Amino acid sequence: MTPDQMTRSADRVATLRTLMTAKNLHGFVIPRADEHQSEYVPPYAERLAWLTGFTGSAGMAIVLVDRAAIFTDGRYMIQIGNQIDSSVFEVRHIINEPLSGWLREALNAGCSLAYDPWLHTEEGVKKLRTACEAVGAALVPVDENLVDRIWEDQPPRPIGAIEPHPIEFSGEASADKRTRIARLLVDDGIDAAVLTLSDSIAWLLNIRGSDVPRTPSPLSFAILYADATVDLFAAPSKLNDSVKVHFGDSVAVAAPEAFAPTVSSLTGRTVLADPANVADRIFQLLTDAGAVINRQADPCQLPKACKNEVELMGAREAHLRDGVALTRFLAWLAREASKGKIDEIGAADRLEQFRRESDLLRDLSFDTISGAGPNGAIVHYRVTPETNRKLETGSLYLVDSGGQYPDGTTDVTRTIAIGPPTAEMQQHFTLVLKGHIALGSAYFPVGTTGSQVDVLARRALWEKGLDYDHGTGHGVGSYLGVHEGPQRISKTPDSVALKPGMIVSNEPGYYRTGKYGIRIENLVAVREVEIEGAEKLMLGFETLTLAPIDRALIDIDLLADPERTWVDDYHAMVRNKIGPLVDVETRMWLDQATAPL
């Protein structure tokens, strides 16, 4: 953080404290969130970044009159230390040093801690309230966000156009989806479901948009009724005639300002709302209206995660297209990196150029993580002109990138040796590779959760006393969010079973602070597998990602024979599928890059 940035952050916190004092409040909570609980939020909702300087995708700050703290997870601990003013904010690891503990330490009896109820889920508010009540403090909602009051040049809310997502990509008509989900509501005696997750609404209505950076889902609210009709709340300027025709008579559209009054009109109705994803303000409105609240998971999330065969075929096509671009990039990097002229920004730009040459790329699926040397050890590193490094001989380069195509979303990480790697680099890389292979080749019974298979990716690292401080896998949407729920692969206990059709990432890693980062990521689809003599229905993974793994970083002696076979088989698949689609020079490099171990 530059001195100017430090001064700006300190001044903004001081201004916020003045406003808090004027309102007789002792603190205010600032999450990185919008009203839809999006992971990637539009510019107007980047309140945490504006106030603190921290730009990670997960975090929360609490500003009290006499102290302040900012919380994030292990992915961002290095980054946050570089971006915030430590004289203003205490930095806490949100898992190891929970927010509740800090509140019990920092708050006094009689204090009032304020929050914006549109930016916190009901579950999140319960945790905050419990921590406040433990010390005799009060958690109070405010009608207007205090940061918005002091953010003079706050960007406007986005009004990106909504477009239909055709059935050739979705594989199921919106009317059929609405009928299917409405039947679930009827079975549970539910009259309506409040939907606020933008990807749920986009999936249900077969629409896409451009409100959120790198994520083609329009920001909107919706209410699905038991008769399969929907009230959609979105700016009218987002809709053209083709979308209105696409909706037909079963989807009524109103302005976002009509959402809260409509929720308040559900008096006496049984209404489903997800306490883990729906804003606390909605629960307040439903309670005040006398609605019967049915608290259960968003009914669109699990069906959305289980891709149909059309979506899976689209994912395969998108990954083939993406693999061509990535392979061309890796071949280019192999030719040019030794000249010492490539830097992180240049490499990321060149990779994007290769992707755009397909003419089907709609956008990147996230800002490319292009980390050379020690920057690769920052798990969600984002290169800037100030941090931009050359790809130096003797270092590792980590590139995590993806694309948004109309038939699928991609996400792939490769770690590349720039020049000859050290024996230590090879050892650490191979330990990560062993975990990647163990998970990618695993079979498991129906009902298994991601947390139950996570250990497979970590075992080789654990045996050497090593680990990584992030999840092993996240769900991926179908031309939607590059991170989607409810499935995941993580050490954190999880009750959601892996089901056929789910797409998840397989991305173990290792990070040596100040030296290098290693991550190997493929996307895989959960599929049924046939095992001779099996007594249970078993599942496994189909690998979707097609790109070489750097053979120079593999210590063959650390691999067992089945692991060597896995690498050779994977590389043969990459060579056979990608080879015919690239130029002669790239094909020659690919043949060497995928040669048997």
Image (spheres, rainbow, N blue to C red):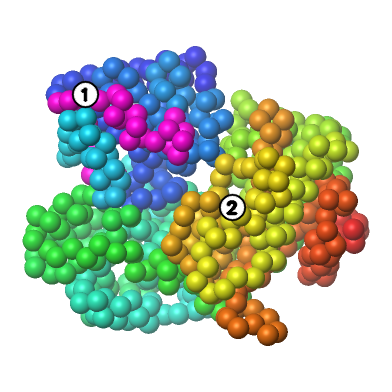
Q: Would you identify the image quadrant in which residue 316 lies?
A: bottom right
Near-viewer residue (46 or 412):
412
Q: Is residue 285 magenta?
A: no
* CA neighbours of label 2 inside 10 A, class few (<14), some (14 to 19), many (20+): many
Disc 2, disc 1: CB below 8 Å?
A: no
Residue at (30%, 78%) from the top-left corner?
A: 184
Pick the quarter of the image with the C terminus: bottom right
**Which residue type does callout 1 highlight?**
Asn
The residue closer to the viewer here, 484 or 246, is 484
The stretch drawn in magenta includes residue 99: yes
Q: x, y percentage for residue 362?
A: 56, 58
State which region is magenta: 92-120
Q: Quadrant of residue 44?
A: top left
Residue that appears at 65% across and 57% down: 456
Q: Residue at x 90, y 61 (%)?
A: 596
* Image vertical order of residue 226 relative to residue 90, above or below: below
Residue 534 position in % (x across, y down) = 64, 82
Amino acid type, residue under disc 2 in the picture: Thr
Q: Is residue 566 above or below residue 99?
A: below
Residue 518 makes an appearance in the image: no
Circle 2 residue: 472
The numbered mark at residue 148 is: none
Tell me the distance, in whole angstroms, between the alpha carbons under discs 2 and 1: 39 Å
Q: Which residue is mark 1?
A: 108
